[in-house]
Image: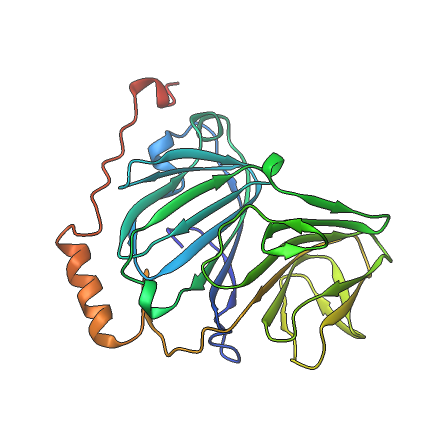
Amino acid sequence: MGGHLINQPLPQPSLQYCDPFILIHHMHSIVLPKQRENDVGIGPHPHRGFCPITFVYKGNVVHRDSLGNKQTVEEGGTQWMFAGRGVTHSERHTKELASQGGEIEIIQFWVNVPARLKMTTPQYKAISFDETPVIESETGKIVVVAGSYGGKVGPAPTISPLILLRCSLNRNGSQLYTIPRSHNTVIYLLDGELEINGTTIFNKQIVTMNHDGDSVTIKAVFDTRFIIFSGEPIGEKIEHYGPFVMNNQTEIMEAMRDSQLGRMGILIEEFEPDDYYIE
């Protein structure tokens, strides 16, 4: 992705789509020092027809877009965007990280939206860790990013019903997680080893839940981090190509044309000379 090696648990040959979740990318890498800010991260690119959401675990992401937004999301924060009818954005890192180097770990995932909303006004929201409610117990933590869970309400907007949880469990810790039976649910394991209803999964694996109950018991074999993606299925046919998610091939072709004509906005990144690393 943008020249970076990533782990892609979704889509995969055995699971092309888990409505409303289209794609999950996990990037964990090192930014080498002595670079300029405009040489790191991912440069301007368009989106249309879905919500790209980024969880920042390590490092930071500097978001710029054709709507005029420029904000930095630090560790523990969330970058939420509704692409709507079209937006162009970039995902860089701060000049300090570019010049000094450091570790980057992010999860980006794409959430579909209903057809009736795909061509509406795009939106953006940066969410810090301090704005995000945390449920703590002796066995671990649950960070509620979106939806209602455990008496907490996540700050990320939801266009269709979603529950997004960033979870951690301590070694040998066990927790019962309540998930609506009507939702499609994906669990992605960043690292460690989990037992989910008696089945063991290992780091960077994904598992989907059957609609046979409203809870799941998860036990950590080692200290571990994982994400629970849970959402009400939209139930519409989708077509996706590159950065566009629509409902048919005609709409994909229109998105490609509109992007080439600049109808998804123009983003000209501006970097002051002081932003450059000078030896």
259 vs 164, nearest the viewer:
164
Instruction: Indicate the quadrant containing the N terminus: top left, top right, bottom left or bottom right.
Output: bottom left
Q: Is residue 241 visible?
A: no
210 to the left or right of 232: right
Q: Position of residue 241 (x, y in %)?
A: 30, 68
109 vs 200, nearest the viewer:
109
Which residue: 39% across, 44% down? 124
**Res. 134 image quadrant:** top right
240 to the left or right of 234: left
| Outermost residue toward the front in this view | 151
Q: Position of residue 175 (x, y in %)?
A: 81, 60
Q: Position of residue 90 (x, y in %)?
A: 34, 43
* Colouring scheme, one of rainbow, by chain, secondary structure, one colour: rainbow
Q: Is residue 117 visible?
A: yes
Which residue: 20% across, 43% down? 266
Classify 97 as above or below 29: above
83 vs 109, nearest the viewer:
83
Classify 248 as above or below 160: below
81 vs 28, nearest the viewer:
81
Which residue: 33% across, 34% down? 38
